[in-house]
Image: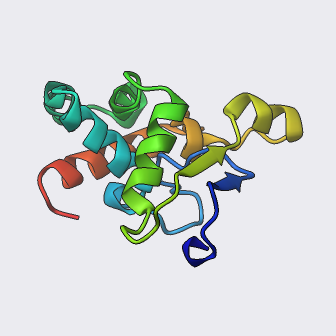
Amino acid sequence: MGRLEPRKIVIVSSCPQIRFPDYYGIDMSRMSDFIAFRATIQLLKNTGRQKIINDVYQKCKAQQNLPKEKMKNYVTEIYKPFTQEEISAQIAEMLTPKEVDCPVELVYQTIEGLHKACPNHTGDWYFTGNYPTPGGVKMINQAFIDYYENKE
């Protein structure tokens, strides 16, 4: 597309940013597989907020031996400092080849828009981190620990 010399490239996704692994039938278990996660980690580093990464790791590690029913998804805290638009802009920057001279924008569906479009389907955990079972929460925390400890 860049060779066509457009003024701007806009890529639209009909789904929200995939931020969390799906442990219910799709093999997507490594945090580093998600561009939204990688972009958010980069934003945290770019803005001097690496402490959030460390804090989330400590919280996940501290509850590692708790019963899964008592665990909380602390990985959601990674995304809290940024808007969806900020993360989308970072994703676009990371994915745009250097030879593309025009601005590239990524537009994702919002969670609210998803719920409006699919009102009877509540399976949004890979977008929101709101897992329907305690096992999903346990798995996301372990996935973050593995990422942090470079085990994935």
Residue 73 image position (x, y, % from top left): 39, 31
Which is more toward the observer, 92 or 27?
Answer: 92
Q: Is residue 84 visible?
A: yes
At 22% from the left and 53% from the top, the residue drawn is 147
On screen, residue 122 above or below 74: below
On screen, residue 24 above or below 126: below
Which is more toward the observer, 88 or 41?
Answer: 88
At 47% from the left and 52% from the top, the residue drawn is 92
Residue 113 image position (x, y, % from top left): 78, 33
Which is more toward the observer, 62 or 102?
Answer: 102
Residue 144 image position (x, y, % from top left): 27, 46
Quadrant assignment for the C terminus: bottom left
For residue 67, what is the image quadrant?
Answer: top left
Compared across the picture, whether 149 is left or right of 6 comes to: left
Rendering colour mode: rainbow
Quadrant assignment for the N terminus: bottom right
On screen, residue 138 above or below 26: above
At 65% from the left and 45% from the top, the residue drawn is 107
For residue 95, what is the image quadrant?
Answer: bottom left
Q: Is residue 119 visible?
A: no
